[in-house]
Structure formats: C-alpha cells, structure tokens
Image (spheres, helix red, strand yellow):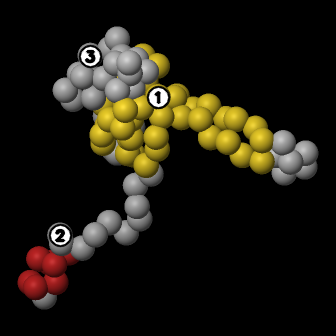
Amino acid sequence: MADNIETTGDAERPNERKVREGTVVSAGMDKTAVVTVVERKRHPRYNKTVQHTTRLYVHDEANDLNVGDRVRVVETRPLSKKKRWRLVDVLERAR
C-alpha cells in the first residue's frame, strides 16, 4: 500500500495542459504580459477562413518580454483574477 502512495507522485498528469503560441501586445504590467493568439477556422456553412483572436494574460516572472515577441505559453492554475497562463519560452524576439 505504501508503494502505491509513493508512485502516484511520479505518474504523469491525467490530461495535458493547453499550449498556445502568440504575440505580446502589452508588457506594461509588473510580471504580466498580454498575448494575443490568432486561431483560424473554416466556417461550417460558408467555408471561408475566419480568424478568432483571444487575449491571454500571461505570468512573466523575469519581466523580460517586449511588445512584438513571439512566445509559447501554457495553461496553469489561477494566479490572479485574469491570469491563467504562464510563459514557457520566447520563440522570437521583436526587432
């Protein structure tokens, strides 16, 4: 029975966390950045490609993001009223 308790900590998560890639549009807050994620879908009836933009509030512990950076973020526990994502890595720095 004790062996079972020890191994549960090593087991991986039952469901994967969501991962998104987007562009930083605001970095003025302390340890927080706003990232826009553009999702392109085909309209079910008209078959036209439709863009849907979502703004995510991302936790940036090092405060090193700048507007225009391409980043990868992952879902996490609620960190504040709106912040539910954290920074994984910077894919491309703004020029």
Which mark, by number, is residue 10?
Answer: none
Which label was assigned to residue 30?
Answer: 3
Residue that numbered label 1 is attached to: 23
Q: Amino acid at mark 2?
A: Gly
Q: Residue furthest top?
A: 28
Mark 1 or 2: the one toward you: 1
Quadrant in which residue 71 is drawn:
top left
Question: Which residue is at 62% across, 31% downward?
Answer: 53
Q: Nearer the viewer, residue 53 or 10?
A: 53
Quarter of the figure with the N terminus: bottom left
In the rendered structure, which disc, 3 or 1, sits on the residue that comes first in sequence? 1
Picture coordinates of residue 26, whole percent (x, y):
42, 16
Residue to which mark 2 is pinned = 9
Tell which of 3 and 11 is nearer to you.
11
Name the amino acid type tagged 1.
Thr
Q: Quadrant of residue 11?
A: bottom left
Identify which residue is drawn at 39% across, 26% down. 69
Q: Are there few (<14), some (14-19), or many (20+) residues within 10 Å of tag 1?
A: many
Q: Residues within 10 Å of mark 2 (few under 14, many from 20)?
A: few
Asked if residue 81 shows in the view, the reply is no
Q: CA distance from mark 3 to mark 1?
A: 18 Å
Residue 62 appears at what percent x and percent y? 19, 26
Q: Is residue 72 above or below residue 62?
A: below
Amino acid type, label 3:
Asp
| Vertical order, 27 against 53 (above or below) | above
